[in-house]
Image (cartoon, coloured by chain):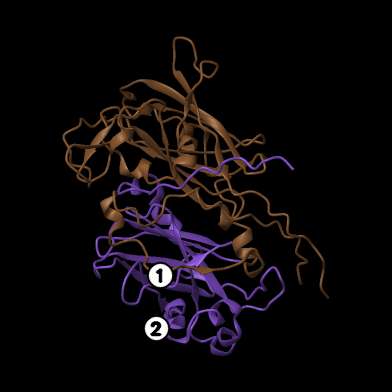
């Protein structure tokens, strides 16, 4: 087997990511009134608790749905999607339904990755291999909060108290 | 019934590939880098959602999207350049039909963005936004304007070397990458903490090469920039269901 090529290093998206990455249509993985549509909102904050107004949240799901939303002046993002199906890990372990999340921002030299699990799936979440690998007191940081009918809130904290659980994949 | 099939997996990046999130020379990392170690998910603990990815851009991306030099009232001002290269994985395999997004400052070093306030001239015929799909050989190609350097507030007399921002999807969530392409022999590298944050072994992979074969006579200068994403992992997995 030949030597692998040198990977291209990551760099920050910088403060002007909106020029190319902010198409408002892309926050809709499904239209807002689609059957089964859910609305996920949240705030991206830094280690001082301040909102991050130049970030980008991307969501990917096992059913192929993708959404992307830049954060606004208050650090807020929103996406419309469907709750994904539960899929096993590649080694065959059952998992709870979850959305995979990439976070980009000025000041982040590489993306950080987390997951959104759902609060109504208590039993499946209890058995989920990734959630189970997180200490009890931090597990809730991977679970969205119910925020009304078909609506969830999922905040991302980059650093400090309540720092999100990030995943190295 | 379970069907045995092989799921393509992707080997993790070697440790001296990406810049550390805590890079004090780049001040904006100070409050934005996580303090805790991330939870390591071995490849066997990922799933099809993370090892596959949405395909998009087909039917949406047009050839015109890859030419940034044509504005509403004429041509953009500056040195016209062709930027082309191949999107590959670490095994050297081309990644075909994959979305490449590009954004950049204009020839004056000014971004068309409400937050960019330095007194570089705006060009009404240059948005600095492009995209294309790689072809069957993994090749992408843009026609654009060579961007200028621009000042920023990171340290006294700080200037970013001229660069293009690239966003890549590859075939998998694990391959997602946002990076910056620089130009050869830029005299501003020595004071740029964003470039310097990259481990020395990997910095060369951010710098394009002037390529006379890409240059078009009496039209545009050519630069080559190959982009390499994570490659195949040899561990076989039997997929359940």
Q: Colour of chain B?
A: brown
Task: Return the residue at label 1.
Answer: B36
- From the top left corner, tell me how far across and down residue A107 is, in percent: 32, 54
Q: In terms of image quadrants, where is residue B34?
A: bottom left
Residue located 44% across and 45% down the image:
B199
- Same chain for mark 2 and mark 1? The answer is no
User: Is residue A34 in sight in this rendering?
Assistant: no
Position of residue B38 relative to residue B171, above or below, is below
- From the top left corner, tell me how far across and down residue B98 is, in percent: 58, 44
Residue located 47% across and 35% down the image:
B204
Q: Colour of chain A?
A: purple
Residue located 59% across and 62% down the image:
B50
Tell us which disc is closer to us: 2 or 1.
Answer: 1
Left or right of B11 on screen, residue B117 = left
Residue located 52% across and 29% down the image:
B84
Callout 1 environment at 10 Å: few (<14), some (14 to 19), or many (20+)?
few
Report the quarter where the C terminus of chain A lies: bottom right
Question: Relative to the observer, which residue lies in front, B199 or B241?
Answer: B199
Question: Relative to the observer, which residue lies in front, B86 or B157?
Answer: B157
Report the quarter where the N terminus of chain A lies: top right
Q: CA distance from mark 2 to mark 1?
A: 32 Å
- From the top left corner, tell me how far across and down residue B55 is, in percent: 60, 52
Residue A148: which disc? 2
Q: Secondary structure at mark 2?
A: loop
């Amino acid at each position: 087997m030949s030597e692998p090529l040198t990977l291209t290093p990551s760099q920050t998206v910088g403060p002007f990511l909106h020029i190319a990455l902010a198409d408002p249509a892309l926050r809709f993985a499904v239209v807002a009134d689609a059957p089964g549509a859910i609305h996920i909102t949240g705030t991206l904050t830094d280690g001082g608790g301040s909102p991050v107004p130049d970030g980008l949240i991307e969501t990917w799901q096992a059913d192929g749905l993708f959404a992307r939303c830049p954060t606004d002046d208050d650090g807020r993002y929103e996406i419309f999607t469907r709750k994904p199906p539960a899929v096993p890990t590649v080694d065959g372990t059952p998992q709870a339904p979850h959305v995979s999340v990439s976070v980009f921002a000025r000041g982040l030299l590489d993306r950080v990755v987390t997951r959104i699990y759902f609060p109504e799936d208590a039993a499946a979440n209890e058995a989920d291999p990734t959630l189970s690998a997180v200490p009890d007191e931090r597990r809730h940081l991977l679970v969205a909060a119910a925020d009304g009918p078909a609506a969830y809130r999922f905040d991302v904290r980059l650093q400090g108290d309540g720092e999100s659980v990030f995943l190295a994949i | 019934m379970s069907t045995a099939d092989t799921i393509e997996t992707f080997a993790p990046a070697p440790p001296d590939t990406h810049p550390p999130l805590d890079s004090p020379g780049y001040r904006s990392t100070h409050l934005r880098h996580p303090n805790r170690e991330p939870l390591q998910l071995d490849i066997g603990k990922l799933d099809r959602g993370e090892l596959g990815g949405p395909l998009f851009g087909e039917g949406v991306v047009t050839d015109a999207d890859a030419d940034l030099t044509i504005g509403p009232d004429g041509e953009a001002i500056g040195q016209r350049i062709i930027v082309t290269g191949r999107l590959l994985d670490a095994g050297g395999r081309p990644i075909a039909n994959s979305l490449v997004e590009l954004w950049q400052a204009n020839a004056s070093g000014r971004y068309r963005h409400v937050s960019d306030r330095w007194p570089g001239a705006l060009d009404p015929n240059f948005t600095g936004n492009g995209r294309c799909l790689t072809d069957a050989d993994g090749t992408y190609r843009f026609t654009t304007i060579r961007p200028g350097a621009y000042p920023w507030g990171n340290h006294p007399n700080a200037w970013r070397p001229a660069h293009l921002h690239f966003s890549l999807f590859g075939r998998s969530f694990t391959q997602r990458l946002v990076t910056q392409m620089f130009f050869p022999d830029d005299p501003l590298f020595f004071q740029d903490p964003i470039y310097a944050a990259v481990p020395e072994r990997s910095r060369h992979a951010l710098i394009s090469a002037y390529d006379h074969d890409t240059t078009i006579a009496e039209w545009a200068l050519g630069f080559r920039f190959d982009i390499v994403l994570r490659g195949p992992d040899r561990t076989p997995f039997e997929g359940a269901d």
